[in-house]
Amino acid sequence: MNSTLDVAWLPAELAKAEVRGGSAIVVDVVRATTSITTALASGARRVVPAVRVDEAREVAAANGAWLCGERGGVPPDGFDLGNSPSGFTKERIAGRTLVFTSTNGTAAMRSALAVGPRTLRLACFRNLGSVAEAVWSEHGSEGNGGVLVVCSGRKGRVSMDDGWCAGHLVRRLLHFGPGFELSDGAAAARELAVGLGAPTAAGLARMAAGRALGKLGLAEDLADCARTDDLRVVPIWRDGAFVSGGEGEENG
Amino acid sequence: MNSTLDVAWLPAELAKAEVRGGSAIVVDVVRATTSITTALASGARRVVPAVRVDEAREVAAANGAWLCGERGGVPPDGFDLGNSPSGFTKERIAGRTLVFTSTNGTAAMRSALAVGPRTLRLACFRNLGSVAEAVWSEHGSEGNGGVLVVCSGRKGRVSMDDGWCAGHLVRRLLHFGPGFELSDGAAAARELAVGLGAPTAAGLARMAAGRALGKLGLAEDLADCARTDDLRVVPIWRDGAFVSGGEGEENG
């Protein structure tokens, strides 16, 4: 029996998704999953997602962790870093625990966890191939459970950048083999990715999330968000935080 | 200022949509909006949507109306007609008031009404060009308010047939002029429609709603759902029911 490859275009769909026991992957290209992937690639030890800013402050204070993320696109008062991928440099964060909160991404991560997946990973364009490999190696040969890609969306609405990335992830997974039955959401995302082609900063700049970043003077972040397959790290959920999976994940 | 052309891929997005005072259009290609459009083209006087079956029975009994629609794809006990477009013939329904309930479509209509649009219309492939004309003639020259296309989805999940139709509606509206700013949802639907091309019964049969109909032995309905631009009727909300708009709508 083929296993299901599903894409939720919005976290609101998760109430109706069937992935209990399967593999879930959250996507928030602009910018949460790009930033967290970058942070782990730069040597952050753990990234703890927090939905609310006050919750982020509490968790960071209790753990001696750095506070990172945004509201309205910019870091709240007292945060150590915002949500620009380029801010997560080795010099700043290697070895640190980060607490991360963002408007859409961290809420989507919580929603995905609530579904009860066997694994939860984060994907962006930067680690697309590595995510596909990790999901396939966990899942592909078994042919059961199911794979659910969760687009974070933007303030409760469909976000095209997430659908674009989810569609490319669907395409990568299909390269490994035909053993998936696509949901309508997955098939629609695949069509979108075929239509839009390879990710570009200019393409992201035309979408709602990119336009909003431009208004904040942060359009340069889109170049980082559009980078493709330059990182091997796959953030994976372990004991209350995202840690570095991907290379050597089997030993992790 | 350009007005917004928005597509909600799911009714759940409406909580975050900005269309108060604008034009809303609900799409449920397989099969509610196709059936209601067909019914009005066959001379039904009014079609009253009901979300629940018991509500449909009450309203029909109180109005001497015919009961139409489905649960699980088939007509509940005591219904006069199901949700097959071909069932809504002139011989059966000309001059009648119908009460109509379906799993996804009528709930989407209620959700769209709750947003408080200036007008609410129903679209399917059969009346695509007429809907585009009606919306443009109401809206296009003003350049304010906004247009919101609502995909009914399927049991809370994205339904590809609705996105396909919504995308073609976006394309038709853009033919009239450049005066729209597309939301991410609208741009994604347009890409989907470009990728999938013109509607076909075979295409619908590969999607979740089409596959479900096939299992019920109702795949022949998909030929009616894929018909394009053969009807001029545009169902429009007036005083608690959908009535025939389109040709002569200005006088209606």
Image: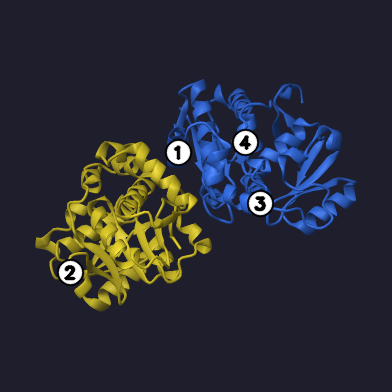
Chain colours: A blue, B yellow
Q: Nearer the viewer, mark 2 or mark 3?
A: 2
Residue B163: x, y in percent? 39, 47
- The label number, if any, that marks residue A124 in the structure image: 4
- Mark 2 residue crowding within 10 angstroms, few (<14) / some (14–19) / many (20+): few
Q: Position of residue A53 (x, y in %)?
A: 76, 57
- As measured in the structure, the alpha-carbon distance from the residue carrying label 3 to the one carrying label 4 is 16 Å
Question: Considering the numbered disc 1 on the image, is that residue within a helix, a strand or a loop?
Answer: helix
Q: Residues within 10 Å of mark 4 (few under 14, many from 20)?
A: many
Give the structural element (helix, strand or loop) at label 2.
loop
Q: Is residue B75 visible?
A: no
Which of pointers 1 and 4 lies earlier in the amino acid sequence? Answer: 4
Which amino acid lies under the numbered mark 1 shown in the image of this protein? Leu
The chain that hosts pointer 1 is A
Could you tell whether B49 is left or right of A108 in the image?
Answer: left
Residue under circle 2?
Answer: B248
Cα separation, mark 1 vs mark 2, equals: 38 Å
Which residue is disc 3 drawn over?
Answer: A107
